[in-house]
Image (cartoon, helix red, strand yellow):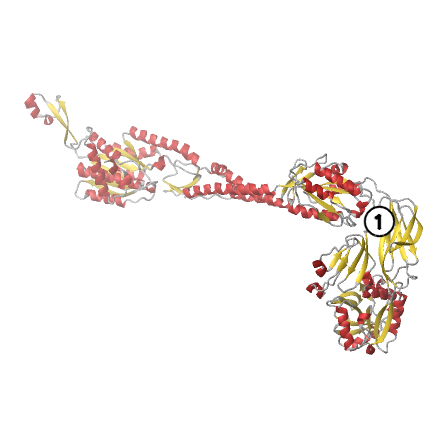
């Protein structure tokens, strides 16, 4: 089933709904073997009653048989609101193989929406931004919400530059309910500035997850000779030699990733690096892993 | 190391082209898009340095390509000692000129040449040549020792005059075909007269090293008969004189016995005192030769080491006076008077003038006359004109004096030349002088230029197709020679009287008539003396016989053999008199001649070329200081060895390597795009 999560395979499928279904079905099938994850309203554990516990959770059937009081615990007892913030700046259109960062982000978002709405019955919403908010679909579980979200993803074409500060201020006003906020971006910004811009969401009580989407060529670029590089967002040109890319660039990129991860985790947020030539299951696992934690 | 064409080294400047391409020209690459330049740093300086390093191999190959290209055109060479180059060609040139007959010079030269050949390496190729008037190649470049020695042993002395200029020309021609170094060994008496007029003719090519082997160290005294002045044809033996010059070369003052030998018999002997290293003139007042052709010699009892030049030969033809037909107008009595007087006054004249009026000459056969003169005739009978045309085409000669009569006609008889209006200088109260004269022409050889003669009239003819011998100051041709068939027509555009010019009143007129008569009668051609290696014309170049091969000539050499084959006798136009002695020649016209041939008198001067000149020629004091050393001996002249072939090979390799390296870089470029 792993091959259904391969972005190269997904690139050959038309329609985000079909992609999302394929990803989630394949992912769920693979999860049945795992004891660590469950779904909403599923039994989780028994715990001995202690004074002060809610008597509504006592398993009276068990008390009748054994005369012992145990509390029955379930997972996903409440609906978790999922909001995905998708970076649609020009840098997201970079690619070195079949799947661009933007498409990979679309696939991941679509799969998460499908999983949330179709499987978990959770309300899901979408915010597309670059240096301002371009699209906002309010989280909902209404009929047709999944199609609206997927259409929003389809229409999110990369343009302009990334600027986290202005959209994030807007998000704080929009996000009234607590829930899970997933930010999908390539995060070409100083980690400190990113955390500073996103941190208020965490203060609001939401679970914030950063999906850092990068192309393998961005992590370990290869140059055959001195080349002139053009920034997709600023169109600035720069002549670069292979020696620098092999040495200093990789050190700086690793430091950036490490710093971003440590800063976000220090701020109580989750961080996950998604490389566009890797399967999408990591993103879905992260979602399912974090969702019960909110309860 | 040197360069044959060093100016092509300026092409090295073309190395600047790859320098421009690799280091100066802006390098262009296709830009690549990246998400962000956040983690990149500009690397222009290090990038340029890197690019230089990366393309260094290609740049080096391209610069090398340009350098080698310039070198190929500059033709580099290295000088290598002859001993080190076993592949060099050994050329042995033995002087076999007339002076080598003195003493045992030729034998010494041949022995030294054989010794030189014996000391060469067996694998070394050698070539034998004989040097006299021309360079004679006796063998091809071969390694066969026996054949080479046989060629040297077979060299016999000749009567030719040696000329080192021929050796220089021959070596230059050889160096163009033989690309290996050449080691030239010259075995000669190093006679000074062998030097050409221009020293540059002797200079050898750069890849030829010269080793000189003088066969004599000091010149020997030598007396010789330097010249003989005798009539080639005579009528009256009492009037004939033989004037001879006896010369001494490096000799003390001494008395010498001089003999006049006619047909093998000594007819007169005189004793003269020859001054030290000087000359003396001696005359024999009579030349008692029988009728017909006689073989005459002037001999001295020199008693020196060079006996071959003690004799000078000359041939004399004794005959009855030949008649000369002089056709003139009835009213013209001056022309035959002047011409006849001059003909009779000539010292060696052997002609009798037969004047006749033009109208009475119709029945005459021109073949019975030595030559014919047409003097100022307005018209001649057509029968006579046809006879004269045939007479000229068969080898006869005619002198035409145009005179004023031709001014009334539109053409000159026999010649058919169209006559324009004549120039009457007297009508304008003046006269014309001779402006230019070709004194190499036999008929005016000693005419003195006619500078004092005044010409009052000259016919105007078209000189095209004729040899203009003399012309007046205004450019009007005065004396022209035109060949018709095998004969000649000599056209004098003025008259032979004292009316149209005053030339008959000058002494030069006698000399002119004398020389013209001998030239027209062909006396000069039929007898006398020549020098070895001169040529005798057997038939006219325009002769029909030469084309059809009809009439054969006949040449009998001094040894009684016929040097020409039957085919050559039918077609040859000239013959080279290679040996001293008497030649019997029958020309295509049917006339016989006895020609005496003597060696060049310069061969009798045995003075040696100065040592400094020999060193200058050989270009190395080593070769001159050790003349007796053989090829493998101490003499090791340097020879230029061309390297252009190796440079060309390197050029091809560099071009191939450049193509391979460049194609790899191109492949990288494609991948980047």
Q: Which residue is more in the foreground, B442 or A157?
A: B442
Q: Quadrant of the C terminus of chain B?
A: top left
Is any part of residue B208 visible from this angle? no
Is any part of residue B605 visible from this angle? yes
In the rendered image, residue B242, in percent from the top left (x then y), is placed at 89, 57
Q: In the structure shown, which secondary structural element does the residue marked by tag 1 occupy?
A: helix
Q: Residue at x 8, y 24 (%)?
A: A62
Instruction: From the viewer's perspective, tell me whether residue A171 is left or right of residue B382.
Output: left
In the rendered image, residue B603, in percent from the top left (x then y), is placed at 81, 48
Q: Which residue is more in the foreground, B12 or B447?
A: B447
Q: Indicate whether B283 appears above or below A177.
A: below
Instruction: From the viewer's perspective, tell me whether residue B558 is left or right of residue A83.
Output: right
Which residue lies most toward the front here? B560
* Residue pointed to by mark 1: B309
Q: Residue A195, located in which quarter of the rendered image?
A: top left
- The crowding category of the residue bearing disc 1, from other C-alpha atoms within 10 Å (few below 14, some 14 to 19, many at least 20), is many
Q: Residue A211, located in which quarter of the rendered image?
A: top left
In the rendered image, residue B119, in percent from the top left (x then y), is placed at 70, 36
Instruction: From the viewer's perspective, tell me whether residue A44 is left or right of residue B375.
Output: left
Instruction: From the viewer's perspective, tell me whether residue B85 is left or right of residue A50.
Output: right
Q: Indicate whether A46 appears above or below B100.
A: above
């Amino acid at each position: 089933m792993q091959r259904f999560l391969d972005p190269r395979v997904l690139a050959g499928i038309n329609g985000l709904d079909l992609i999302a279904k394929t990803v989630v079905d394949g992912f769920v099938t693979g999860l049945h073997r795992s004891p660590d994850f469950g779904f909403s309203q599923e039994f989780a554990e028994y715990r001995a009653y202690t004074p002060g516990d809610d008597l509504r959770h006592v398993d009276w059937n068990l008390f009748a048989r054994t005369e012992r009081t145990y509390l029955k615990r379930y997972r996903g007892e409440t609906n978790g609101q999922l909001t995905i913030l998708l970076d649609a700046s020009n840098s997201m259109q970079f690619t070195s193989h079949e799947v661009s960062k933007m498409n990979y982000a679309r696939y991941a978002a679509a799969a998460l929406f499908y999983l949330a709405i179709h499987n978990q019955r959770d309300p899901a919403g979408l915010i597309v931004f670059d240096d301002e908010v371009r699209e906002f679909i309010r989280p909902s579980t209404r009929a047709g919400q999944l199609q609206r979200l997927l259409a929003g993803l389809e229409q999110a074409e990369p343009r302009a530059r990334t600027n986290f500060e202005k959209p994030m201020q807007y998000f704080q006003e929009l996000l009234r309910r607590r829930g899970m906020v997933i930010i999908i971006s390539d995060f070409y910004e100083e980690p400190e500035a990113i955390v500073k811009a996103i941190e208020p969401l965490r203060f609001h009580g939401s679970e914030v997850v950063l999906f850092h989407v990068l192309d393998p060529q961005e992590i370990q670029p290869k140059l055959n000779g001195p080349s002139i590089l053009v920034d997709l967002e600023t169109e600035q040109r720069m002549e670069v030699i292979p020696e620098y890319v092999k040495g200093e660039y990789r050190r700086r990129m690793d430091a950036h990733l490490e710093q971003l991860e440590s800063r976000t985790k220090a701020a109580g947020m989750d961080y996950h690096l998604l490389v566009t030539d890797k399967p999408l299951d990591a993103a879905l696992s992260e979602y399912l892993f974090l969702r019960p934690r909110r309860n | 190391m040197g360069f044959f064409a060093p100016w092509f080294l300026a092409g090295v400047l073309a190395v600047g082209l790859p320098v421009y391409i690799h280091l100066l020209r802006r390098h262009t690459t296709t830009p690549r898009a990246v998400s962000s330049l956040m983690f990149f740093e500009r690397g222009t300086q290090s990038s340029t340095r890197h690019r230089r390093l990366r393309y260094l191999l290609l740049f080096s190959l391209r610069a090398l390509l340009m350098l080698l290209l310039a070198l190929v055109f500059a033709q580099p060479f290295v000088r290598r000692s002859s001993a080190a180059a076993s592949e060099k060609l050994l050329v042995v040139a033995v002087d076999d000129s007339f002076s080598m007959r003195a003493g045992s010079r030729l034998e010494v030269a041949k022995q030294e040449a054989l010794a030189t050949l014996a000391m060469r390496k067996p694998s070394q190729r050698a070539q034998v040549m004989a040097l006299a008037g021309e360079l004679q190649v006796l063998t091809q470049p071969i390694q066969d020792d026996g054949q080479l020695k046989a060629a040297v042993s077979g060299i016999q002395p000749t009567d030719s005059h040696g000329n080192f200029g021929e050796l220089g020309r021959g070596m230059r021609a050889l160096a163009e075909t033989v690309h290996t170094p050449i080691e030239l060994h010259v075995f000669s008496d190093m006679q000074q007269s062998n030097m050409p007029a221009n020293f540059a003719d002797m200079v050898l090519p750069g890849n030829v090293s010269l080793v000189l082997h003088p066969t004599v160290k000091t010149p020997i005294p030598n007396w010789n008969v330097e010249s003989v002045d005798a009539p080639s044809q005579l009528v009256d033996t009492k009037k004939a004189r033989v004037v001879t010059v006896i010369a001494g070369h490096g000799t003390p003052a001494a008395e010498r016995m001089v003999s006049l030998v006619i047909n093998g018999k000594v007819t007169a002997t005189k004793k003269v005192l020859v001054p030290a290293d000087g000359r003396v003139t001696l005359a024999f007042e009579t030349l008692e030769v029988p009728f017909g052709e006689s073989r005459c010699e002037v001999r001295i009892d020199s008693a020196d080491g060079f006996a071959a030049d003690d004799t000078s030969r000359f041939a004399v033809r004794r005959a009855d006076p030949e008649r000369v037909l002089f056709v003139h107008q009835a009213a013209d009595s001056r022309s035959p008077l002047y011409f006849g007087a001059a003909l009779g006054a000539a010292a060696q004249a052997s002609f009798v003038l037969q004047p006749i009026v033009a109208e009475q000459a119709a029945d005459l056969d021109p073949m019975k006359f030595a030559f014919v003169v047409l003097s100022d005739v307005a018209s001649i009978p057509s029968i006579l004109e046809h006879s004269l045309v045939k007479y000229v085409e068969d080898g006869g000669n005619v002198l035409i004096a145009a005179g004023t009569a031709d001014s009334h006609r539109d053409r000159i008889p026999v010649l058919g030349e169209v006559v324009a209006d004549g120039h009457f200088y007297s009508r304008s109260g003046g006269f014309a002088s001779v402006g230019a004269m070709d004194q190499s022409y036999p008929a005016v050889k000693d005419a003195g230029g006619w500078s004092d003669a005044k010409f009052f009239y000259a016919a105007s003819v078209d000189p095209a197709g004729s040899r203009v011998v003399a012309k007046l100051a205004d450019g009007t041709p005065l004396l022209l020679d035109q060949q018709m068939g095998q004969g000649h027509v000599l056209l004098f555009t003025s008259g032979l009287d004292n009316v149209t010019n005053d030339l008959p009143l000058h002494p030069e007129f006698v000399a002119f008539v004398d020389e013209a008569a001998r030239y027209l009668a062909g006396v000069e051609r039929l007898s006398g003396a020549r020098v070895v290696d001169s040529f005798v014309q057997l038939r006219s170049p325009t002769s029909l016989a030469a084309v059809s091969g009809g009439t054969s000539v006949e040449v009998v050499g001094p040894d009684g053999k016929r040097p020409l084959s039957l085919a050559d006798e039918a077609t040859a136009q000239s013959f080279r008199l290679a040996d001293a002695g008497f030649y019997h020649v029958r020309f295509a016209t049917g006339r016989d001649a006895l020609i005496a041939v003597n060696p060049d008198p310069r061969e009798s001067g045995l003075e040696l070329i100065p040592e400094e000149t020999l060193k200058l020629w050989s270009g190395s004091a080593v070769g001159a200081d050790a003349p007796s050393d053989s090829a493998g001996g101490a003499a090791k002249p340097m020879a230029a060895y061309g390297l252009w072939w190796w440079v060309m090979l390197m050029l091809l390799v560099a071009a191939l390597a450049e193509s391979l390296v460049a194609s790899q870089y191109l492949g990288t470029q494609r991948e980047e795009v």
